[in-house]
């Protein structure tokens, strides 16, 4: 089908609604036709790259299932001696025990005098060290307004666990001039609230390498909100 050239055709920008020549409008990734001032390229985080996982299983493996003979060593524990002469072949009494030391089984004690061997005490499991959950923070424009993107999601509602530590990494250059902080009031200081500082530590300048805001969620912590100290309407809610 043939179309007119539209040399003198007028059109309205789908975002600002101002009139432009039709050929001046540009088509965005979301299908909108907008003027050059409103045009926004698609943010790279909306199409994250997915790496193909390397296969881990082997085809028809041949594991070594043989039980090696002679591993470990034997410790002889003498409970009593009937002779004082260490050169006497009859120096051993009637009751003694053997402890088989094995790297896989641990210590197994065998008693020869008929008495029950003591049960070895289990080794207590080590206490795991508390982990830190890291969120990657970036800033991007959405319909003309800036928002915090947490792990690629625009201003999502987060759920944090009391007693756990969470790091909001602001190393990405898009965070420049957008310090992330917490408040018990929606939109923080822009909503008439104040900054929440319990368990909160900060480091570096947002937008530079190593910059972050970190929070160890206190027991009984209230519902919180993350926000930008310099700009209104960028953050979201945190449920604890």
Image: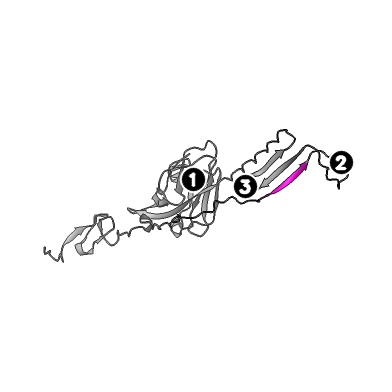
Q: Name the residue under label 3.
A: 104
- By secondary structure, the bulk of the magenta-drawn segment is best described as strand
The residue shown at (53%, 43%) is: 164
Q: What stretch is highlighted in magenta?
A: 71-77
Contact? badges 3 and 1 (CB < 8 Å): no
Viewer-proximal residue among 4 and 22 = 4
Q: Position of residue 8 (x, y in %)?
A: 15, 65
| Mark 1 or mark 2: whose residue is earlier in sequence | 2
The residue shown at (61%, 51%) is: 68
Q: Where is residue 161 in the image (x, y as percent from the top left)?
A: 50, 40
Report the disc number at residue 32: none
Q: How far apart are marks 1 and 2 (CA)?
A: 79 Å
| Mark 3 or mark 1: whose residue is earlier in sequence | 3
Q: Mark 1 points at which residue?
A: 182
Viewer-proximal residue among 121 and 82 = 82
Q: Name the residue under label 2.
A: 83
Dot 1: what SS?
Answer: strand
């Amino acid at each position: 089908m043939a179309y007119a050239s539209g040399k003198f055709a007028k059109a309205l920008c789908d975002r600002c609604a101002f009139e432009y020549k039709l050929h001046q409008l540009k088509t965005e990734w979301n299908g909108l036709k907008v003027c050059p001032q409103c045009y926004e390229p698609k943010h790279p985080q909306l199409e994250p790259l997915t790496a193909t996982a390397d296969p881990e299983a082997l085809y028809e493996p041949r594991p070594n299932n043989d039980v090696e003979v002679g591993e470990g060593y034997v410790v002889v524990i003498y409970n009593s001696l009937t002779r004082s002469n260490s050169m006497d072949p009859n120096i051993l009494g009637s009751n003694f025990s053997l402890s088989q030391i094995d790297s896989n089984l641990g210590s197994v004690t065998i008693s020869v005098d008929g008495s029950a061997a003591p049960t070895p005490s289990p080794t207590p499991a080590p206490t795991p060290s508390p982990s830190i959950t890291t969120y990657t923070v970036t800033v991007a424009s959405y319909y003309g307004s800036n928002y915090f993107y947490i792990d690629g999601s625009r201003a999502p509602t987060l759920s944090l666990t009391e007693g756990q530590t969470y790091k909001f990494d602001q190393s990405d250059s898009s965070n420049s001039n957008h310090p992330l902080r917490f408040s018990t009031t929606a939109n923080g200081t822009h909503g008439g609230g104040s900054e929440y500082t319990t368990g909160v530590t900060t480091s570096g300048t947002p937008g530079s390498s190593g910059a972050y805001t970190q929070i160890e969620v206190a027991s009984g912590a209230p519902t919180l909100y993350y926000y930008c100290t310099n700009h209104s309407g960028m953050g979201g809610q945190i449920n604890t």
